[in-house]
Amino acid sequence: MKSGRWLLWGALLLLTAALLSVLVFLAAEYELSRDQAQLEEDVATVAGDIRSALLRNVQTLQSLHSVAPSPNAWNAPASELLQTHREMMRLEWRDAALQPLSVRVSPFTPGVFDFLGREQAQPEVVQACEAARRASGPAYSASYFWPMRDGKGLELIEMCLPVAFAGKPQGMLVVTYALSGILTELINRDLMRGRGLSFNEADGTRLAIFSAIPANRRNLRAQTVLDLPGHTLILQLESPRRARGLFPNVLTAVVGLLSLALLVVLFLLGRDIRRRQRAEQDLANALAFRKAMEDSLVTGLRARDMSGRITYVNPAFCQMVGRRADELIGSGPPAPWWPPELVDEYQHRQEVRLAGRYFPREGFESVFQRPDGTRFPVLIIEAPLIDAQGEQTGYMSAILDLTEQRRIEDLNRATFERLQATARLATVGEMASLISHELNQPLAAIASYASGMLNVLRDPGVGSLSPEDQRHAIERIAEQAERAGRVIKSVADFVRRRDTEREAVPPASLIDSIYPLVALQAKKQGVRLQIDIDPNCPPVLCDRTMIEQVLLNLTRNGIQAMPMGDPPAGSGLRVLGIRVARASPEPALSPGRAGPAWVSFAVTDHGQGLSPEVAQRLFTPYFTTKADGMGLGLSLCRTVVEQHGGALTHQPAEPRGTTFRFSLPVTPI
């Protein structure tokens, strides 16, 4: 296996050396073609830069004339323009006959036309301006050589631009460019490092040079045509050749065969490497997964050999017993975490368990001790440790710290006991609140009847009552006392959430039972009662006492919502309406029921109504808008109605006030 791998490696090295030799030649040719392509791209970029710069100059001249339409105003900005554009040698404003109106000369080359007069270049100016007049745009003349003093000279070119103001022709702007200035000022000089750039004629004669490199037949050259309106220039870029010599031609077949042989060897070698890497990666992943899993566990893990010595512990176990891994690995019984007085017991238990090799599935509880003397309960679950050959090499233990579990159990036990006591106190408080709230009305009625009787007995001259009236008053007192007893019983059953005894009660009987109390309170407040009971209403199935209390609460709230003076006595709104009629079942509460199987009770007052804030919290326990209210009435009313299967709702009344409505089920036939 190893010899075969070495042969593959040797073949790979030989093929790689041969392939590299071929690739050197191909790389040299590729570098040459790439350099030539890059050079051609760069010369095209330089030509584009020059063309764009010249176009920007034309736009600048047009804007210059638009802001300075007169020669006097034109002189200052023209001079400023020449200071920022060194490629311009001279700037002239000529009339339609090409006579100068204003002339500005570049401050950088003031003596260009000192040796020969400007009139010597008149043919080129005329040529450019005639072409510009025909094209109605900028035009360039042919380049020409202009001699200077001391045997020097420049290659110049004229550009003529027609100008107009307010739609009227204003003559021509003539710009004299130096080709060397164009190369110097209008190109990206970073591209010219180590290269030569020049303007050439078609026969290769150089007109202007920006930079030059030593002449060499190995230099790379690239040319492009710079098309200007009226004239064309040839731009040439030279660069030294980077290739170092030439290699003989190499047949494509040799490269193909070498590449194919290399691919085969690489495939065979790669397959072997992939197998090994896959096996190593799987092993590394398994080890990393096991390590991450063991390190993340809160359960302590401990491995021991057949003699009971520790061979492995995870971080959770070390943290549990308060010792480092290097202190634990290799140690045997007695363990350092055993309490001193329990060492003999634990030693005997371990010997018995390991000798019989019996490990209960549910584990066993024990007590460990940390170095600081702290003791804590643990649950130990052990199992045999089997190696890859299926032989037992030791024992694996999982240890759970039960300290938190014991604490939570004690806390839950104490919390449950407190909740039971609190629930009993809450029930007692709720019953007391309900009884005190619901007994107010029958006790108030008893007190009222008793006060009337006492007034008659104390002062017979004030008014006389017949025996029948006296008997009637005493019967009313007895009824209200009996009613108070029923209230106490119903409230107690309600608080205990027991099923109350329901009976078939005619709706009119419910109204008649509360009428004396409602009428008495309405008379005191100056409110007129308006009762409308549908004679066709069937009996309802309800707890009579609790429903009477609901009606009493709603009517009392309605009367209190209309205090004296609001609404005014003459408005006709000081009326409390009680309406009883048949109603259809509410779909949300009685799905599937069809037909008029419910009776609706509505209590309407004409008070100020409910604000949105009050309406939102109206049925919240202990929420009240009254100074002496307890906030339990409407909450209890809704609970009672919902226990009967209905719902207590409210809505605005017209023209003002509020209507409270609830439904009770009809007694089944």
Image (cartoon, rainbow, N blue to C red):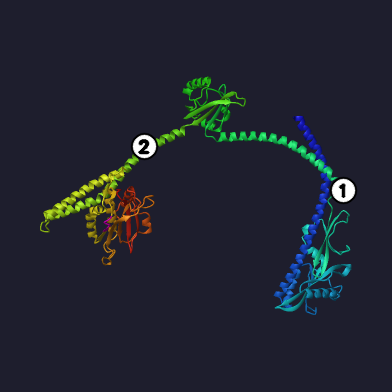
Residue under circle 1? Answer: 246
Residue under circle 2? Answer: 417
In this view, the residue in front, 602 or 495, is 602
The amino acid pointed to by label 1 is: Leu
In this view, the residue in front, 543 or 443, is 543
Q: Is residue 125 above or below residue 226?
A: below
- The quarter of the picture where the N terminus appears is top right
Task: Examine the residues drawn in magenta and state their main secondary structure.
Answer: loop
Q: Is residue 54 above or below residue 595?
A: below
In this view, the residue in front, 1 or 53, is 1
Q: Earlier in the sequence, mark 2 or mark 1?
A: 1
Q: Is residue 561 visible?
A: yes
Rendering coords of residue 503 (x, y %): 27, 47
Range covered by the magenta-colored residues = 532-536
Q: Is residue 436 visible?
A: no
Rendering coords of residue 552 (x, y %): 27, 53
Using residue 288 as the reference point, say whether residue 619 is left or right of it.
left
Crowding at mark 2 (Cα within 10 Å: few <14, some 14-19, many 20+): few
The amino acid pointed to by label 2 is: Glu
Using residue 305 as the reference point, say whether residue 168 is left or right of it.
right
Rendering coords of residue 186 (x, y %): 77, 64
Q: Is residue 577 above or below residue 296?
A: below
In this view, the residue in front, 397 or 477, is 477
| Residue 39, numbered label | none
Disc 2 element: helix
Rendering coords of residue 613 (x, y %): 38, 57
How many numbered callouts? Answer: 2
